[in-house]
Amino acid sequence: MSAQPKRKIILKNLKEHNTIWHPQSTLVYKSKKERVVIGRFVDGELIPLDDIAVELCDEWRMKPDESLLENDDEASTHDSKDDDEASSHDSKDDDEAPTHDSKDDDEASSHDSKDDDEASSHDSKDDDEAPTHDSKDDGEASSHDSKDDDEAPTHDSKDDGEDDSSTLSNSINEHITAVQNFCTVIQNRETNLQILLSKSMGRTSELEEKLAAAARERQEIEDELDVLKKKFKAMKSLFS
């Protein structure tokens, strides 16, 4: 099977059932904490986990509630076992029925009266115990729901805060890297300018030395010219 491209999953609150769901696939999670799929939400109705939901889980790479899958398998196995036992029991009753009909009638009447007494006693006991058990379940359910409602926003806000902090940290790191690169470029240019300045100063020194040498040569030439002029005047005065 070829790998499917990863899709972006956006979850939303499902207030009717106090949980979250994925509208695009209609898959419903067990709760805001337990991220396992328990069914589908279609036309305002929660459909328990079925084959369609399992196929959608595979398609969207979500995890179905394994306990529901195990319950379905056990229920199927139990039903088939009950059918086999019922068939075997019916065939056995058909074989034994002619012999025990009269005896069963007497026992049935006695057993029915006994069952009526026990049922009455059991019903009264259930009536006394049921309100206490129901109120306890209601209290636990209300406490669990309020706890989920309180913890879910905190978890979401924490995730949002971590995302914002991570984005801000990445942005700061990028700016620091850009400044460091800019400083490196400036340092390289400063080094190049220092090299050029050093070369220029060296050339200036050479030119100054050459200029000084030229000045000395000029002075020497001027001195020699003065000497020649004086000799020329002296020779001229002799001839005149």
Image (cartoon, grey):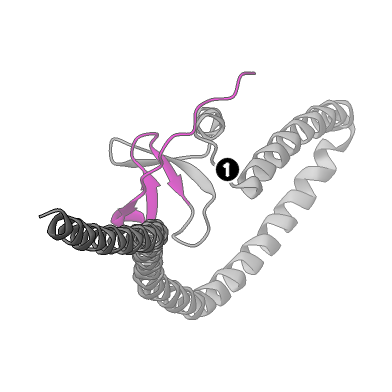
Q: Is residue 24 magenta?
A: yes
Image quarter for residue 110?
bottom right
207 and 84: which one is in front?
207
* Rendered residue at 13%/60% (across/down): 237
Q: Residue furthest left?
A: 240
Q: Is residue 168 visible?
A: yes
Which residue lies under the disc numbered 1? Answer: 64
Q: Is residue 104 magenta?
A: no
94 and 101: which one is in front?
94
Instruction: Tell me which amino acid carries mark 1.
Output: Pro
* Rendered residue at 36%/57% (across/down): 210
Quadrant (top left, top right, bottom left, bottom right) of the C terminus: bottom left
Give x and y (percent) for residue 151.
41, 73
Give x and y (percent) for residue 132.
49, 81
Give x and y (percent) for residue 177.
41, 60
Q: Is residue 78 left or right of residue 230?
A: right
Question: Magenta segment, which residues?
Answer: 1-29
